Amino acid sequence: MGLINDKIAVLYISQQGRIVAEHLAQKMDSVRLIDVKGDFMNRVADAWKRSSALICVMAAGIVVRAIAPLVKDKYTDPCVVVVDESARFSISLLSGHIGGGNQLAEHVADCLGCSPIVTTASDNFGLTALDLWLKHNFLLTEERELLTKKSAKLNREKKLTCYIDMQHSGMLPDDIVKIKHVNKADIVITHDAKKVRDDKSCLTAWPKTLFLGVGCNRYTSAAEIDQCFSELLSNSHLKKSWFKGIASIDLKIDEIGLVEFARMLDLPVSFYSKIKLNSVEDVAYSEAVMKATGAKGVAEPAAILMASGREQTGELLIKKQKWPNVTMAVSREILRLK
């Protein structure tokens, strides 16, 4: 289970609660047991700050009173699961979807042999949890209020419409229906800002499926490469958060500026040989690059290679852009829906 890690705290307040907590600790890896008796509110607040999830072995009411001043946002709050001291129920109380509370409640129930209680509407009606679906498919959105409204519409009408303007594999959920006209879509999946409707009534989801191909002269600094990248983003209306990796020729594997630039963005770098780069068709040819490296180009073929899988070829989204010491291109992998 992905949520189980050393940031899960199991809180208890009584001797009976401790027995349940210790039983859980035997079944779950790397959880912290915390006795909150005595300085209850402060210990709960400390566990809240330090944990990705709280499992509270006590009455739900006292948990609600303790966390009420701490709750801010479902995207940042830890999830909270409540277990009664008789270990009959495992209740997902807070951050059921994004925070993983529903999944954790079910896992705790399996460990204790008790009944999980999940109250989120999408789960009870067998509908797609829209926030989780976006997260699992690496579809980014900043429109949290609109996401809440679309989730409510899905629960109410049992269907949402979706427009996708790129190649994709996999299937949409049964209750998210693909349509051909952007002006009728509840959800728009795109990298093109022009596809976002002016009425702001559609939820825009930006896929994290882009790769940056980079060629640079020897000793080009990270700051200069980053400045070029910022200009590329501004000119093309793309965002850093949509990128998954950086690619270049293997001659640059020890290029300090390029390596530092990748570290700044916290992105992996792949390096390709001239043979691999030359195997990519329909890319820009450079006589200067061929003379210096033996490759017909770097930025475009490197980006395409990194975006390509065993059965699918990446798409060149932005052709080679040139600066005095840097060239860049952007590719896009096929969106894999699941």
Image (spheres, helix red, strand yellow):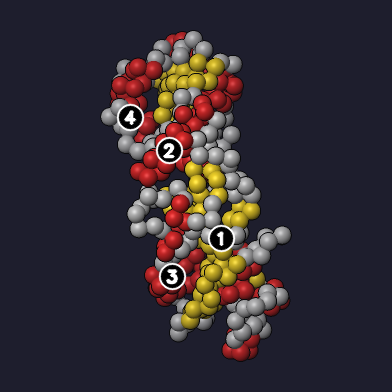
Secondary structure beneath disc 1?
loop
Q: Position of residue 330 (x, y in %)?
A: 53, 69
Q: Are marks 1 and 2 in contact (CB under 8 Å)?
A: no
- Give the quarter of the figure containing the N terminus: top right
Q: Position of residue 271 (x, y in %)?
A: 62, 69
Separation of residues labelled 4 and 3 (CA atoms): 44 Å
Q: Amino acid at mark 2?
A: Lys
Residue 218 or residue 145, whichever sits in front: 145
Horizontally, residue 333 falls left or right of residue 185, namely right
- Residue at 58 percent across and 89 percent down: it is 288
Of badges 1 and 2, the one in the foreground is 2
Residue 77 or residue 21, whichever sits in front: 77
Of badges 2 and 3, the one in the foreground is 2
Q: Amino acid at mark 1?
A: Met
- Residue at 39 percent across and 40 percent down: it is 148
Q: Are marks 1 and 4 in contact (CB under 8 Å)?
A: no
The answer, for residue 244, to whether it is visible in the render is no
- Residue at 30 percent across and 21 percent down: it is 65
Q: Earlier in the sequence, mark 1 or mark 4?
A: 4
Q: Earlier in the sequence, mark 2 or mark 4?
A: 4
The answer, for residue 291, to whether it is visible in the render is yes
Separation of residues labelled 2 and 3 (CA atoms): 33 Å
Of badges 1 and 3, the one in the foreground is 1
Answer few, some or many: residues within 10 Å of disc 1's Cα (few below 14, many 20 plus, some between 14 and 19).
some
